[in-house]
């Protein structure tokens, strides 16, 4: 399986939204704050994707702040493309047009075209106006110049790229080389089909600035690694639906930071270099309990988040003060095995939360709806929010965040 367009949380935790605040925003997204300025996107050459992209979770767009006064907007240019000689037959090429926009007038400062060979995620934001761009199994570094500089290349297919909230660490997961399974005796007959060749996933954790390897591992499948500080978070089962939330530094001893009660395996999503959201399943109902905990074990806030949304995505500020959370609203309850098509999806809601308090600062719907996300952005300092909406990039100035829970 190739690189995930958006790495999905487990199905039982799909798309969580704050019950009361988000429901109000869902109904009144047009009556809330008006954008401070709008940049029409049709003059830039953007054409909304077909409904096929709604549930395919393919990447065809990205929106990011370079700094508070500049946006990086990339999108797929529709049209036929000539196949390149010696390209693999399963390539799904697309031309991505990248534009640097100056705020507030939307002046184009730089442009470039990048040929991508698949429809998986191709852009991640690093620190200080730098970005990673993926072409097949190679990562390139770029900035406001849009020039691509080699960063990392692996010999096998990339399965995942993950960036820590403070942008200091990067996880690269790549398909391992094929290994034939051991057999008891080579002369023994084979019953049925021969066993498949194993291809373990190689996990490399690097410092983003120096590309220094600090940890590595091997698993059977690509996994999420909730990085925080100089380590990662992991949930360990205990007795009677109790779970220990552990901090495992890459160097040093592990420690328990808190324990929670959950009828399912908790999911951890790191928000800053010190704060992690721990999402649990109560014994009754389908909603989910969310705890914001620090590395020293303090619970900053907790909320009950609603379960009638699917396929969540996050975007974080560089300073960890805020996070944006997007999810698709469906028009009927969805079970684990229920199929989803474009007729089931009513809205894509995006909310901006203060990390320290859980306060919802702004909620808007994004249009067109994109199941892979990346059609919204937070500035590195969390004081500006941008969303693709109603034929324009809408930009909102946000008040300073509160620091006390």
Image (cartoon, helix red, strand yellow):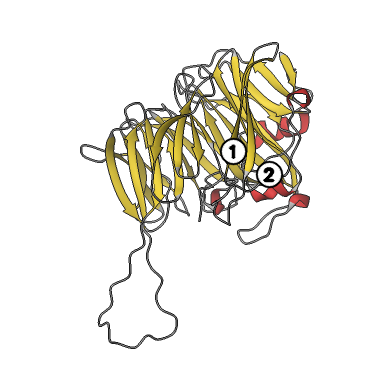
Depth check: 202 or 258 in front? 202
Q: Is residue 104 above or below residue 77?
A: above
Horizontal and vertical percent for residue 193? 44, 80
Depth check: 398 or 101 in front? 101
Q: Is residue 68 above or below residue 386?
A: above
Horizontal and vertical percent for residue 202? 35, 50
Residue shown at 73%/24% (left/top)?
Answer: 44
Horizontal and vertical percent for residue 204? 33, 43
Characterize the local packing of mark 1: few (<14), some (14-19) or many (20 or more) Cα atoms within 10 angstroms.
Answer: few
Q: Is residue 96 left or right of residue 281?
A: right
Residue shown at 40%/46% (left/top)?
Answer: 173
- Numbered mark located on residue 77 in the image: none
Q: List the residue tagged with mark 2.
A: 81
Q: List the residue tagged with mark 1.
A: 115
Q: Is residue 269 above or below residue 41?
A: below
Sequence-wise, the earlier of marks 1 and 2 is: 2
Depth check: 226 or 308 in front? 226
Horizontal and vertical percent for residue 139? 45, 36
């Amino acid at each position: 399986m190739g690189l995930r367009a958006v790495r999905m949380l487990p199905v039982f935790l799909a798309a969580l939204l704050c019950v009361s605040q988000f429901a109000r925003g869902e109904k009144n997204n047009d009556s809330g704050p008006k954008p401070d300025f709008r940049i029409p996107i049709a003059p830039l050459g953007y054409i909304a994707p077909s409904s096929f992209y709604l549930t395919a979770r393919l990447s065809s767009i990205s929106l990011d702040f370079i700094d508070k006064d500049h946006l990086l907007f990339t999108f797929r240019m529709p049209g036929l493309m000539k196949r390149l000689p010696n390209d693999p037959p399963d390539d799904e090429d697309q031309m991505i047009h990248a534009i640097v926009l100056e705020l507030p007038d939307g002046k184009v400062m730089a442009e470039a075209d990048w040929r991508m060979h698949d429809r998986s995620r191709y852009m991640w934001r690093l620190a200080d106006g730098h970005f990673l761009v993926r072409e097949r199994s190679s990562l390139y570094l770029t900035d406001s110049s849009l020039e691509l500089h080699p960063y990392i290349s692996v010999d096998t297919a990339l399965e995942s790229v993950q960036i820590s909230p403070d942008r200091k660490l990067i996880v690269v997961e790549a398909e391992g080389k094929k290994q034939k399974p051991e057999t008891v005796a080579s002369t023994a007959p084979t019953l049925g089909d021969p066993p498949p060749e194993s291809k373990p996933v190689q996990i490399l954790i690097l410092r983003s600035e120096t590309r220094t390897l600090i940890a590595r591992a091997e698993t059977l499948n690509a996994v999420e690694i909730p990085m925080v500080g100089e380590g990662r978070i992991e949930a360990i089962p205990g007795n009677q639906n109790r779970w220990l939330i552990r901090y495992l530094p890459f160097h040093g001893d592990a420690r328990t930071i808190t324990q929670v009660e959950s009828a399912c395996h908790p999911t951890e999503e790191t928000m800053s270099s010190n704060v992690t959201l721990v999402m649990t399943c109560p014994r009754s109902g389908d909603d989910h309990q969310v705890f914001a905990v620090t590395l020293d074990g303090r619970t900053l806030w907790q909320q009950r988040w609603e379960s009638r949304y699917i396929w969540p995505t996050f975007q974080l500020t560089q300073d960890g003060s805020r996070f944006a959370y997007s999810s698709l609203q469906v028009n009927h309850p969805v079970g684990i095995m229920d199929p989803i098509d474009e007729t089931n999806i009513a809205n894509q809601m995006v909310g901006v939360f203060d990390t320290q308090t859980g306060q919802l600062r702004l909620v808007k719907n994004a249009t067109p709806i994109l199941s892979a996300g990346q059609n919204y952005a937070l500035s590195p300092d969390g004081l500006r929010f941008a969303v693709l909406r109603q034929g324009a990039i809408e930009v909102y100035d946000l008040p300073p965040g509160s620091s006390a829970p």
